[in-house]
């Protein structure tokens, strides 16, 4: 029997994906008797006038059955006389493209359905690109609903030619185009008498025979560490799945990113000793000496793995909020998750033509190539060389939802020649010289809430007590450092990133830094915290009601925003995301400036800055 085949069905909405798989299972007699009876009973209540609705075998959600569309990915395992299969029936609706991408990420082959009466749609082309992005190299184009055209060969050949031209730009190993009718069963398990002009195999026999060998397996051993097992003081093992190559006892391994080396002392499958392990196997590795290994480290013999903090990647964006340069996320590669940000969007790809277009932001379901900066150097590889070490996801730091996925195209070499220069006078020496603990106190709130007034009052009190301070104000930095930035979302992200970098340098100089910025986005404030350091960052939320802020409106900004003279004004036409966990919250409508300053000093600042 041939090895397991994992494949997906994809394509535009209502192209017949669920119906196809359901009919295949039915005709191949791969269903139990109770499943057949349930299907026949449910079909009587469906939308096919009592005829069997094969899609009901896959569409399990009530919303799917009501709307007649697939929403979630439906996985089905089945076995024929020649092969075992896992099929992922993925949604065709654009709203659920992220679900389709999840199904494609684990597939060896894609069956793309096309409605012969509709031809190639934008979603069909998008799904082809996503499949290619996810490393799928074997494709079947199933031209469905041939019965609606009287099994006309001309329509079929036209779609086949157009698809082959489009697919020529991708690295495709095999492509089979099959005319089918998912409802009538033509060319699904047996050749149809309605298409005598088609001489190829029906769909199921084709899937049973195709060889889907991936890129030739690497000889080099690679295992990302998922867990460090330490049940007692005598045992320390590193657990994970072997992604490529083999490993045996006595072999010398390199540990990345630290670049230490050690020899394999023992290998265990569960609690049984083994002499060797190969790709796909979960193992525990014991080394002959103590080395720095934690979750996210990589044990390997591969000298070509990159260790870097900058890379270029092709990205599929899945979030409702667009991606801007400078936006910070958690980025997961292998088993390691680190903060990172998109430095530059090089271009986005037109779904229909493949043309590379300039872009300053990427919207949901768009594809783009981006340059990414990570908070630390981590091991990775090009996706084409090692899928497990070259695939990545973007995680929203506030909601913890997956915002996007991507594949590594290359390491950016320019960062390898840049090293942080250590000086003999360290930040700690500078702080001790000043007799204080450097901090950044970050004031956030609406325009007119009293942020800068409050920060100014606190700085005066700190200075009079002998502390060394500096104050960064939103308006002031835009006169110089950030003069080139506007007020759209992307520029606001970059504005806060630059300020955070300046505040960190001020802290390195031993100074207490007070930063007064609206900073409306929670993710940007979290990015600032990450840059400056969690232990040196204090969030002060100046939660003054907007009605009070408008009454103060000394600059007339609210009036102009209400009149439409200012666009994207925070609190009026632009969003403000309140801090979820501020160190302290004050309302300057309830407290005088003096009382609010004393409250902040006594509650959060003085306990941290005194040595």
Image: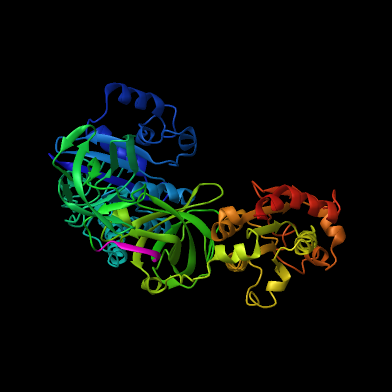
Q: Is residue 606 above or below residue 564?
A: above
Span shown in magenta: 304-311
Does any portion of residue 16 appear in the rendered image? yes
Is 257 displayed left or right of 254 in the figure? right
Q: Quadrant of the N terminus?
A: top left
In percent of width and height, residue 575 lies at 68, 56
Does any portion of residue 135 appear in the rendered image? no
In percent of width and height, residue 22 lies at 31, 36
Measuring 51% from the left and 53% from the top, which residue is drawn there? 319
Does the magenta run of residues contain 305? yes
- Viewer-proximal residue, 424 or 42? 424
In percent of width and height, residue 490 lies at 59, 66
Q: Is residue 303 above or below residue 63?
A: below
Measuring 56% from the left and 57% from the top, which residue is drawn there? 533
Is 518 displayed left or right of 243 in the figure? right
Quarter of the image for residue 231 reads: top left
Measuring 29% from the left and 40% from the top, which residue is drawn there? 236
Q: Is residue 470 above or below residue 270?
A: below
In percent of width and height, residue 132 lies at 32, 58
């Amino acid at each position: 029997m041939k090895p397991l085949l994992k494949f997906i069905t994809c394509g535009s909405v209502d192209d017949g994906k669920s119906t196809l798989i359901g009919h295949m299972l039915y005709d191949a007699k791969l269903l139990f008797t109770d499943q057949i009876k349930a299907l026949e009973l449910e079909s009587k209540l469906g939308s096919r006038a009592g005829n069997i609705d094969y899609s009901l075998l896959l569409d399990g959600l009530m919303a799917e059955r009501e709307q007649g569309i697939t929403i979630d990915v439906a996985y089905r395992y089945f076995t024929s006389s020649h092969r075992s299969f896992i099929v992922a029936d993925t949604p065709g609706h654009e709203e659920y493209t992220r679900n389709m991408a999840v199904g494609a990420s684990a597939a060896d082959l894609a069956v793309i359905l096309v409605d012969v009466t509709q031809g190639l749609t934008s979603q069909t082309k998008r799904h082809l690109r996503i499949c290619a992005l996810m490393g799928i190299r074997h494709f079947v184009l199933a031209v469905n609903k041939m019965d609606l055209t009287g099994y006309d060969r001309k329509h079929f050949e036209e779609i086949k030619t157009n698809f082959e031209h489009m697919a020529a730009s991708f690295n495709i190993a095999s492509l089979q185009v099959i005319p089918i009718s998912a409802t009538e069963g033509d060319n699904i398990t047996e050749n149809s008498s309605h298409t005598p002009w088609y001489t190829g195999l029906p769909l199921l026999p084709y899937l049973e025979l195709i060889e889907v060998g991936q890129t030739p397996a690497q000889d080099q051993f690679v295992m990302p560490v998922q867990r460090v097992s330490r049940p007692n003081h005598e045992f320390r093992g590193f657990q994970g799945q072997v992604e490529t190559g083999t490993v045996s006892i006595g072999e010398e391994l390199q540990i990345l990113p630290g670049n230490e080396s050690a020899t394999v002392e023992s290998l265990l499958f569960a609690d049984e000793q083994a002499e060797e392990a190969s790709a796909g196997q979960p193992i525990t590795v014991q080394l002959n000496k103590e080395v720095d290994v934690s979750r996210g480290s990589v044990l390997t013999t591969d000298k070509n793995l990159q260790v870097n903090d900058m890379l270029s990647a092709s990205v599929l964006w899945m979030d409702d909020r667009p991606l801007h340069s400078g936006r910070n996320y958690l980025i997961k590669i292998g088993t390691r998750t680190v903060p990172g940000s998109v430095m530059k969007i090089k271009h986005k790809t037109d779904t229909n033509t493949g043309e590379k277009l300039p872009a300053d932001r990427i919207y949901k379901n768009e594809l783009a190539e981006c340059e990414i900066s990570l908070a630390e150097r981590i091991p990775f590889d090009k996706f084409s060389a090692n899928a497990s070490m070259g695939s990545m996801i973007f995680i929203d730091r506030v909601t913890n939802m997956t915002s996007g996925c991507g594949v590594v195209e290359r390491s950016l070499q320019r960062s390898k020649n840049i090293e942080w220069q250590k000086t003999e006078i360290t930040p700690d020496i500078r702080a001790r010289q000043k007799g204080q603990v450097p901090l950044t106190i970050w004031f956030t709130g609406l325009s007119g809430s009293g942020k800068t007034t409050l920060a100014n009052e606190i700085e005066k009190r700190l200075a009079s007590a002998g502390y060394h301070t500096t104050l960064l104000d939103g308006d002031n930095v835009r006169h110089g450092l950030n003069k080139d930035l506007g007020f759209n979302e992307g520029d606001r992200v970059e504005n806060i990133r630059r300020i955070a970098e300046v505040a960190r340098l001020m802290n390195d100089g031993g100074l207490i830094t007070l930063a007064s910025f609206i900073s409306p986005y929670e993710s940007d404030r979290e990015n600032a915290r990450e840059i400056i350091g969690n232990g040196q960052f204090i969030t002060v939320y100046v939660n003054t009601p907007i009605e009070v802020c408008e009454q103060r409106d000394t600059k007339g900004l609210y009036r102009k925003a209400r009149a439409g003279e200012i666009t994207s004004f925070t609190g009026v036409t632009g969003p403000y995301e309140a801090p979820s966990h501020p160190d302290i919250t004050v309302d300057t409508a309830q407290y005088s400036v003096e009382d609010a300053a004393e409250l902040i000093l006594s509650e959060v600042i003085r306990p941290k800055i005194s040595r």
